[in-house]
Amino acid sequence: MVLAAGCHAKPTALTTTQSRPNTSAPYLGASGANVLPVQVGGPGLCGQHGYENEPCTEVQICVPGTRQCEKVSDVLVDTGSIGLRIFSSVVSLPLPAQKTPQGSRVAECAQFGTGGTWGRLVTADVLLGGEPAVNAPIQLIDAGFGQLPKGCKNAESDPQLAGYNGILGVGLFKQDCGEGCVTSVTNGAYYACDDTGSCTGTAVAKNAQLLNVVALLPQDGNGFLLALPQIDGSGAAQVSGALILGLDTQANNRLAGVTAYGVDRHGNFTTSYLGHAYPNSYLDSGSNALFFPNTNGLPVCAKSADAGAPFYCPAEPTSALATNVSGGGGLQTQVDFQVGNAESLMGSQRQAFNNLSGVITDSFVWGLPFFYGRAVAYGIENRTSSLSTGPYLAY
């Protein structure tokens, strides 16, 4: 899931590479205060209304400066967005509203690939695993708050329909919008809402935007690893993995066997597939499939095509190959993957699939199937590990 708005600094070039094959195995047994369990498939961390390839975790939020807290499970781990967003209907805490200097309540419209969230911003102390609490703005998702802006499309209205209670956006950047929302009131993301519910566009300082909670951690704020086990082409009913906070900051998050790839100012890189280059490609745990253009005429599932969100349905699993090139150029790697029959997979009563794939027109989205069997590292902007200064991806 990726925000439509965003403007971030261009990363520095990467020069460090490592050639050993990457595997998630050394990280799956990690324990410690900096480890959040991640689960695909319910029950447990994922609720009963989830969907295929939904990585879930649990967070704790508190009234700032108090021990008045609530735990929220069924929170989507999304490396394609920034900030913590929780449906207001699952929060009962009296969290203080975030306001503009003029006293209006701040709200945000976050547009994702297939939908969006709308709701006001509040301030909370957020706890990830056993890490120290960090104070941050979070969004309470509520499509009924104030006057929904015309440009805010497909705003989620119910956690059961959405398939999650919240979204933990832990991407490559520190804020969800950056400089573009500091300098312009027509940024399309942030709004000032008065007591009548009328909402107009507003500029928001960087530290008042939704923030990457990981980046706020005192010791482990330079990035994270998302590790999931390998599964076979038939899928799995449930998968357990780990979100390990920090890179090279503790014994359980040492980087080994990975190559770092730079990204552009939007967190994207280039994927070459069947002779075509797609420069707006990205890794995204919040996307439940591999999405790429249908340049070779793969069969599309009839039911999903009618619904407007086509998935691939080849008669037999199909092997494919693509090449990822770092945002700064130079570094590249080949990635082989499988395309399965989505209707058969999703009708199997399983929840985790490494070959679920769908159609998109102008980019290559490496969704959750890419993460199975890998420990994927995200280096946050302007923070350093043994590989380089972020933002970067490593696998």
Image: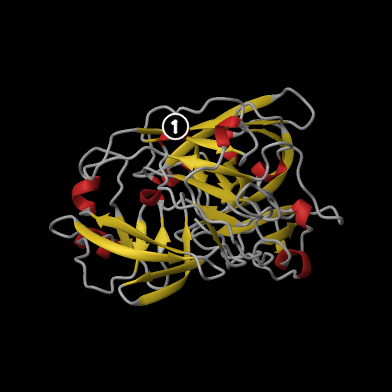
Residue 46 shows in the view: no
Q: Quadrant of residue 201?
A: bottom right
How crowded is the residue under tag 1: few (<14 C-alpha within 10 Å), some, or many (20+)?
many
Instruction: In this rendered view, identify the residue nearer to me: 73 or 373.
Output: 373
Q: Is residue 39 left or right of residue 382?
A: left
Residue at 77% across, 64% down:
182
Q: How is the image coloured?
A: secondary structure
Q: Nearer the viewer, residue 239 or 34?
A: 34
User: What is the x, y in percent for residue 365?
Assistant: 42, 61
Residue 358's place in the image compared with 46, above or below, is below
> How many marks do you count on the picture?
1
Q: Is residue 41 above or below residue 190?
A: above
123 vs 144, left or right, is right
The residue at the point 50 percent across, 54 percent down is 259
Residue furthest to the right in view is: 102
- 149 vs 272, left or right, is right
Which type of secondary structure does the marked residue at label 1 adopt? helix
Where residue 77 sits in the image (x, y, percent)? 51, 43
Depth check: give the residue in front, 285 or 318: 318
Question: Residue furthest toward the top?
Answer: 67
- Residue receiving disc 1: 28
* Residue 166: image location, x then y, percent: 54, 41
The picture quadrant where one finds residue 362 is: bottom left
Q: Is residue 69 visible?
A: yes
At x 64% / y 58%, what residue is drawn? 147
* Residue situated in front as seen by the camera: 317 or 375: 375
Q: Position of residue 312 (x, y in %)?
A: 24, 61
Amino acid type, residue under disc 1 in the picture = Leu
